[in-house]
Amino acid sequence: MRAYDRVLVDVDTQVDFLDPKGKLPVPNGPAIYPAMERLFDFARRSGTPVISSADEHSAHDPEFEQFGPHCEAGTAGQCKLSFTVLPRATTIHSGDALLSDVDAMLDEHQQLVFAKANLDVFANPWLGRLIDRLNVGEYIVFGVCTEYCVETAVDGLLARGAKVAVVTDAIRALDETEGARVLQRMADQGVRLIRTADVISGGDSQQK
């Protein structure tokens, strides 16, 4: 199995969360568009693999009791922002089959989008199985929201022994105070807090 210096982890960069007209927008979501565009441009140029999460809810989903309807399957709000989708992307649902040859899968698809119906992307069992098969130096996490789905994605990676960095200028919180608290907890657990420029300055070749 090839080793990957790093893999980008793109959390819930969807219209309902990041467009001000979405159903559950974070405050000032467009402020992080430039950073995210730079990260995806970097991925395209360098061939860096991207793991994405995407909310995909059915009507009357239990989560709507807490947050209200959002990211319903088949709606415009459920779609990822256009610049967060690479040409060779594929979506993986919980009931799908995952190729046993991870390298072959990543040769065919640079971006793997894991659909989920709750806060934790690791509720899609295929993500944990993929992480267990990958040899990655560091996972670079960004997206929304800091104190919800970004936090659960980071916690899931740490629980599997991964090294993790969070791109602080490419995340947004629903509550800035809570978001800052979560970032401090991550740093205390050994997560690197970096910026987009730090990712891009790391070089262009990500596979060994």
Image (cartoon, grey):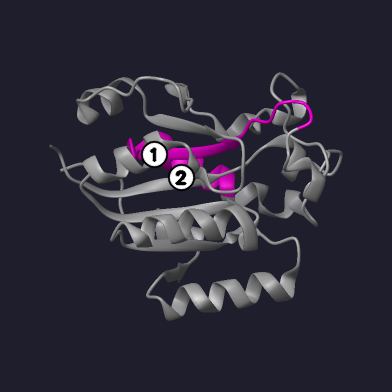
Tell me which residue sits at (76%, 30%) in the image. Answer: 77
Q: For this rendering, which residue is in front, 201 or 176?
A: 176
x, y percent for residue 40: 49, 40
Would you place residue 7 above or below residue 44 in this image?
below
Q: For this rendering, which residue is in front, 162 or 35?
A: 162
Please indicate, yes or no, whether residue 12 appears anywhere in the rendered image: yes
- Crowding around mark 1 (Cα neighbors within 10 Å: few <14, some 14 to 19, many 20+) is many
Q: Earlier in the sequence, mark 2 or mark 1?
A: 2
Tell me which residue sits at (57%, 43%) in the image. Answer: 37
Q: Which residue in the structure is indicated by mark 1?
A: 127
x, y percent for residue 96: 42, 20
Disc 1 is placed on an element classified as helix
Please state the total of marks drawn on the protein image. Answer: 2
173 relative position to 138: left or right: right
- Crowding around mark 2 (Cα neighbors within 10 Å: few <14, some 14 to 19, many 20+) is many
**Amino acid under disc 1:** Leu
**Amino acid under disc 2:** Phe
Q: Which residue in the structure is indicated by mark 2?
A: 122
Tell me which residue sits at (48%, 31%) in the image. Answer: 113
Residue 47 lies in the magenta stretch:
yes
Tell me which residue sits at (34%, 40%) in the image. Answer: 48
x, y percent for residue 172: 67, 59
Placement of the N terminus among the 4 image quadrants: top left
Disc 2 is placed on an element classified as helix
Q: For this rendering, which residue is in front, 204 or 23?
A: 23
Would you place residue 133 above or below residue 108 in this image?
below
Question: What's drawn in magenta, residue-wise?
Answer: 36-60
| CA–CA distance in space, label 2 to label 1 | 6 Å
Please indicate, yes or no, whether residue 206 appears anywhere in the rendered image: no
